[in-house]
Image (cartoon, rainbow, N blue to C red):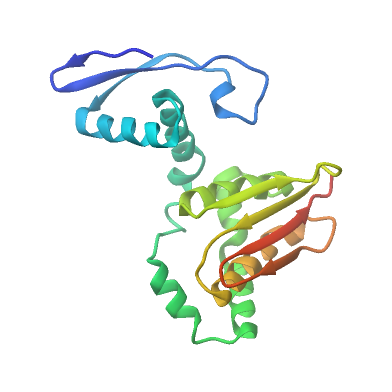
Amino acid sequence: MCGEFKRGSFLLNVTENNNNNNNDISHKRSENVSLRLNKEILAKLKTDAEQKQISLNTLANQVFDFYVNFTSSASADLMPAPKVALTDLVEGYSEDQLKAHAERVYNKVGLDIIYQLRGKYDFRTVLDVWDYRLKASGIPYKHTIDGQNKDRHTFIIQYSMGKKWSLVVAETMKRYFEPVSSKQVDYTITDNMVAISVEGKG
C-alpha cells in the first residue's frame, strides 16, 4: 500500500494477494487501483482500521465488498431505525401477533430482497444475505459451522433488545430459511440473544 498527498487529498493504492480461499475477500484475485480520498475521511478510516487491528487496505476492501454485495441493492427495501423505536413498537403486541407479522413481512418482500441482492434463492444465498444484513446492523453476532455437518449453521446474535424483539428476529430468519432447509429450523431466544440453527439441503 502506498500513497502521497496531492491538493489536499490522498492517493491510496489498494491491492491484495491471489489465493484459492474464495470465502475471504482479502484473498480473491484482484487488481491495483489508486483512489483519491478526502484527508478527513482517510483519517477516520485509518483510525477505524487501527481500532479493528486490520490494515487500511483490508478495511477498504471490506467497505467496497459491503457496498457492492449489499448496500447498493438493498437500500430500497431496508432502512435503519433507532433501537428504542423498534423495541417500543413490538411491546404492544402478543407473541402470536409478532409471529404473524414476521410471516406477513416475509410474504411481501422476502423473496424480492434475496433475488434483488443475488438473483437466486437457495440455502447458500440466504446464508450470505443474512451475514451481510447482520454486518449492516452493527449488532455483535457469531456464525458457526458444525464440525461434523458442514450443512448445519448456527447464528448467535446479541441484540439485547428484549425478548419480543428477539422473537421477531428469530421468526423472520426462520421464514427465510424454511424453504431451503432440510430440517426444521430451531431457535432459542432470551431478552438479549437469538440463537438459531439451520441446515441446508446439501
**Above or below: residue 21 compared with residue 171:** above
Residue pictured at 68% horizontal, 49% vertical: 121
Q: Position of residue 142 (x, y in %)?
A: 62, 49
Q: Is residue 54 left or right of residue 99?
A: left
Between 6 and 45, the residue placed more toward the observer is 45
- Residue 134 x/y as whole percent: 54, 52
Image quarter hosting the N terminus: top left
Is residue 11 shown left or right of residue 62? left
Report the number of discs.
0
Q: Residue furthest left?
A: 7
Task: Name the residue at 65% across, 84% down.
Answer: 96
Q: Is residue 164 above or below residue 144?
A: below
Q: Is residue 91 left or right of residue 103?
A: left
Choose between 119 and 151: the one closer to the eye.
151
Q: Quadrant of the C terminus?
A: top right
Point 70% across, 46% down: residue: 144
Examine the image and state in which quarter residue 79 appears: bottom left
Compared with 59, 133 (above or below) is below
Q: Is residue 81 left or right of residue 202?
A: left
**Residue 109, image x and y in percent?**
56, 63
Picture coordinates of residue 190, whole percent (x, y): 62, 71
User: What's the residue at 42%, 35% (across, down)?
Assistant: 63
